Amino acid sequence: MTKVVKNSEVKLGRKVNPNSARQIRLAELVAKKANGELKRGRPVDSNSARQARLMLQLANKILGVGQGRPVNPNSARQIRLAELEAKKINNGGVIKRGRPAKVVVTDEVAA
């Protein structure tokens, strides 16, 4: 963090010792990252059961195979959704939702 005082920078906090073990380690990490040699995390075992399962899931996703149990087209929900879709198609893509508009009835006496 720096503070600008009349066109000159003043560093705040303690001075950094560039020869300390921590600063040397940080410099090595920056150098490894720049070279692309920095390895983080646990290595992946390509022969594991999890990797085989993930590859199978990816292949199924590409082929369009879904997960879970299939949809029952005769269920109440699917019938209701099909009716809503048919209404939407018949009404030009618009379905009115909510309460209907209030109908005002006026009593007019014919004279």
Image (cartoon, rainbow, N blue to C red):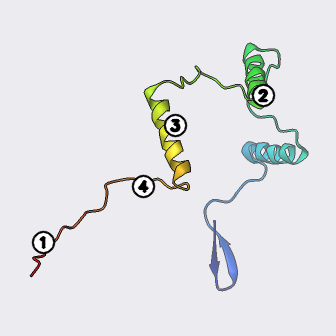
Q: From the image, tell me which residue sits under label 3.
A: 82
Q: From the image, tell me which residue sits under label 2.
A: 63
Mark-to-mark CA distance, 2 and 3: 26 Å
The three-letter code of the residue at mark 3 reads Ala
Residue 22 percent location from the top left of the image: 72, 44
Q: With 81 as the anchor, is 105 left or right in this view?
A: left
The quadrant of the picture occupied by the C terminus is bottom left
First along the sequence among labels 4 and 2: 2
Which label lies toward us, 1 or 4? 1
The answer to whether marks 3 and 4 mark residues whose Cβ atoms lie closer than 8 Å is no
Mark-to-mark CA distance, 1 and 3: 42 Å
Task: Give the structural element (helix, strand or loop) at label 2.
Answer: helix
First along the sequence among labels 1 and 4: 4
The answer to whether marks 1 and 3 mark residues whose Cβ atoms lie closer than 8 Å is no
Report the residue at 88% width, 38% height from top: 37
Label annotation for residue 107? 1
Residue 82 percent location from the top left of the image: 52, 37
The three-letter code of the residue at mark 4 reads Lys
Which label lies toward us, 4 or 2? 4
Tally of numbered discs: 4
Q: Nearer the viewer, residue 83 or 11?
A: 83
> Picture quarter containing residue 99?
bottom left
Task: Give the structural element (helix, strand or loop) at label 3.
Answer: helix
Mark 1 Cα-neighbour bin, 10 Å: few <14, some 14–19, many ≥20: few
Mark-to-mark CA distance, 3 and 4: 16 Å
Q: Nearer the viewer, residue 98 or 109?
A: 109
The three-letter code of the residue at mark 1 reads Asp
Mark-to-mark CA distance, 1 and 4: 29 Å
Q: With 5 as the anchor, is 82 left or right in this view?
A: left
Q: With 86 as the anchor, is 9 left or right in this view?
A: right
